[in-house]
Image (tube, helix red, strand yellow):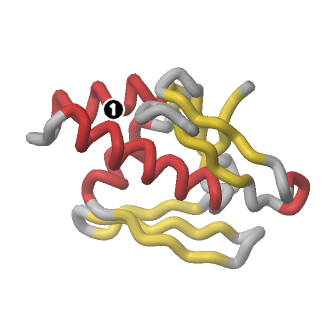
Amino acid sequence: MPRACERSFPLLRAGALGVTVTMTLDTVLRRDPDIVYAPLGDDGVMLNIDAGSYHSLNQVGVRIWDLLETPRTARALRDQLLAEFEVGESDCEAATLDFLGKLLERGLIHAEA
């Protein structure tokens, strides 16, 4: 069973069906360069042209996307969010890992080996 700071997520990209990535706070994440992103007020929208899917982001999601302009660990993302938002560490960690897992599942970001 994964620890609180370790989660497993299936990859849904065509070439990786059935593959599972275990993401920890030390996993380095990067954006998929083919995702089209546009700010929309305080929120944002992303388009995965390959999958034909549209995704909306709230203010925190936009901040995570901005931070992923350069590859960084889930821990670095969590720490930056803790510095910028009023949230407890355990809540921030759980929400950050959950959100990053959803981005991984949808092929919007990738975990570096």
Crowd class of label 1 (few under 14; some 14 to 19; many from 20; radius 10 Å): many
- Residue 91 occupies quadrant: top left
What residue sits 38% from the left and 31% below the top?
Answer: 77
Residue closest to the eye, 37 or 100 = 100
Amino acid type, callout 1: Arg
Residue 33, horizontal then vertical, whole percent: 67, 47
Q: Is 76 positioned to the left or the right of 25 in the image?
A: left
Task: Using the image as rendered, state which of residue 98 and residue 70 is in the foreground.
Answer: 98
Residue carrying label 1: 78
In the image, residue 76 lies at what x, y percent? 39, 24
Q: Is residue 54 above or below residue 71?
A: below
Q: Residue furthest right?
A: 15
x and y percent of residue 78 in the render?
33, 32
Residue at screen point 30% across, 63% down: 58
> In the figure, 43 relative to 74: above or below?
below
Depth check, front residue: 75 or 72: 75
Q: Relative to residue 75, is residue 55 drawn left or right?
A: right
Q: Quadrant of the N terminus?
A: top right
